[in-house]
Amino acid sequence: MVISRDSRARIDAEIAKYPQRRGALLPALHIVHEEHGHVAAESARELAEIFGLRPNEVMEVVSFYNMFYATPQPRHHVYVCTNLPCSLRGARSLLRDLEQHLGVDEHGNTGDGRIHLGHEECLGACAYAPMMRIDDRYCEDLDLEQARRILDALE
Amino acid sequence: MLKVPYVTSYLTEHFADDAFATLDGYESRGGYDAARTALKKMAPADVIELVKRAGLQGRGGAGFSTGLKWSFMPVKSDGPKYLVCNADESEPGSFKDRILLERGPHQMLEGILIAAWATGAEKTFVYVRGEYAYPARQLERAIEEARAKGYLGERVLGTKFRHDVVLQRGAGAYICGEETGLLESLEGKKGQPRKKPPFPAQHGAFGRPTTVNNVETFSHVPHIVRNGAEWFRGFGTEKSPGTTIFGVSGHVVRPGLYELPLGTRLDEIVFQHAGGVLGGRQLKGVIPGGMSMPILPAGQIDVPMANESLRERKTMLGTGGIMVMDDTCCMVRVAEIITYFFRDESCGQCTQCREGTGWLHKIVSRIERGAGEKQDLDVLLDVAGKMEGQTICAFADAAAWPVQGLLRHFRGDFEEHVLQHRCPFPSSFEL
Ligand SMILES: Cc1cc2nc3c(=O)[nH]c(=O)nc-3n(C[C@H](O)[C@H](O)[C@H](O)COP(=O)(O)O)c2cc1C
Ligand code: SF4
Ligand code: FES
């Protein structure tokens, strides 16, 4: 089993909240991401069994949503918002500077598996631009120096 | 945590007090008294009637009458009825629901409880966009507090009414803000909007009668029950009562949130409240209501922020996300960002939308690079026109309108790109 007993118990608790089992699929996918960082084929098989689905039905859902991943991920996801209000406030030059600073490859990854750097659409922080999301955390009202320091401090 | 609004009214007046997000703090300001009044002293039909008389309109973007929507729920039902709270807030330029979740979760829960009583719903699913991790934690904590105190559960406030609230987190897909895309997602599927009819009031979440309302819509409800319809109508305009929380961003001195009556003039918000254009520059244009709403040029912002007035200028209130652009801005770059967004977020079910958003972005990018041709401008309008009113959901319209607005007011910017074979705005924000 790749899904731990602890995660399985949390998934069962989610299922109990819904009139149909499948309602708890997104919550379950979040739980699997917390444990493994992505949904591997084996996790998909186990989830399929729990929800009475086929594994490819689980993977179809995974691929629809930007925050779910089918492959192993770097330790941190960093996204600079480049939608209009942030771009008006210099988000795109910030992103380019950070790309250079970290020396990411064409997919936005650092060579050491530490960071994936990319851009994202509006994150609901438009008045505090430019900003970036690091995993579950928002960093707002950034300047380049500050942003570099925050990224350098990531494990 | 988001900064407290610069201007507050009844929704946000206690937001500077961190305790307001806790049950104790909320109760000490009279919290849950309105739910007590509704559940113990009012029949469900009376609550619906009150909200209708107050004239509350949905704050999620479409502005539909909330009381009327509640009245569509069947009174008798052979099984459960549900509410859904739309906290997917992803319309670019919008960040009001976030502060309502972070600093006023009990206010929203009380609104939900009253709505549940009015519609006979036994459960509410709150769908919070996946990126809103902190707002979701604030709400989860508030739900637990409310349950522990008997505001939620088997016997709400000691009555026979039972109600519970389930929080589900989205996972990064703009289209899950559209109410039927949201319902699909809630059911554990891809968030692809449903054909309507049937409407959610007949066939909603898990096939049951369902009412979907926005975070802010629910948050107004306790105030209406507490103070009455006439009081509510004392804010805003005859046709658009109440306040709303405007989010101001872009080239202004004081970007942030402002809770003001509907009908407050846009120029007053930009120049007085938000301090005017940054760096003493001139204004070029303002998007008044989130990215889907057509832009207004500087000369046309002397308009009350209410749908009846904005419609005369061919735009709408949307989510009240006000994006301000100074005179250095290249409007083709603005169009590039907007069309990229819609191309990226189309769920792909409808040909007009999937192909149309792709074409819009392709042509706009070509123009921005200096490779556009004269007829491209008309092709843009032609493509946009064919996307309107043809698709399963309003996303395609939302993608077409801003392009039409930019060409209506800033056609010259596009023409100059074509004539000069380059972007004529070297000091514009970077793409
Ligand atoms: C493409 C699209 C995206 C939407 N996104 C949101 C959203 O993020 N939040 C929201 O409350 N409503 C959104 N809506 C509107 C909802 O479909 C629905 O009208 C609203 O949640 C109803 O609540 P209200 O009547 O209280 O406004 C969106 C609509 C469309 C067409
Ligand atoms: S209009 Fe676009 S987003 Fe809406 S259902 Fe059709 S393809 Fe999907
Ligand atoms: S545009 Fe960046 S947070 Fe809204």
Image: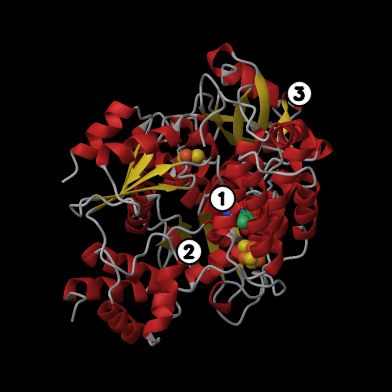
Q: Which residue is mark 1?
A: B341
Q: In the image, residue B368 lies at what x, y percent? A: 63, 39
Q: Residue at 44% across / 48% down in the picture?
A: A120
Q: CA distance from mark 1 to mark 3?
A: 29 Å
Disc on the earlier residue, 1 or 3: 3
Check disc 1: other Cα within 10 Å, few if <14, some if 14-19, many if 20+: many
Residue B114 visible somewhere in the drawing: yes
Asked if the residues shown at circle 1 and circle 2 are in contact, with their CB atoms under 8 angstroms apart, the answer is no
Q: What colouring style does the render use? A: secondary structure
Disc on the earlier residue, 1 or 2: 2
Where residue B302 is drawn, which disc sits there? 3
Check disc 2: other Cα within 10 Å, few if <14, some if 14-19, many if 20+: many
Disc 3 is placed on an element classified as loop
Where residue B125 is drawn, which disc sits there? 2
Disc 2 is placed on an element classified as strand
Q: Chain of mark 3?
A: B
Residue B1 visible somewhere in the drawing: no
Q: CA distance from mark 1 to mark 2?
A: 28 Å
* Same chain shared by disc 2 and disc 3: yes
Q: Residue at 59% across / 56% down in the picture?
A: B343
In this picture, residue B53 sits left or right of residue B9: right
Q: Residue at 51% across / 26% down in the picture?
A: B255
In the image, farthest residue toward the top? B280
Asked if the residues shown at circle 2 and circle 3 are in contact, with their CB atoms under 8 angstroms apart, the answer is no
Disc 1 is placed on an element classified as helix
Q: Amino acid at mark 3?
A: Asp
Check disc 3: other Cα within 10 Å, few if <14, some if 14-19, many if 20+: few
Say if A109 sits above or below A11 in the image.
Answer: above
Where residue B113 is drawn, which disc sits there? none
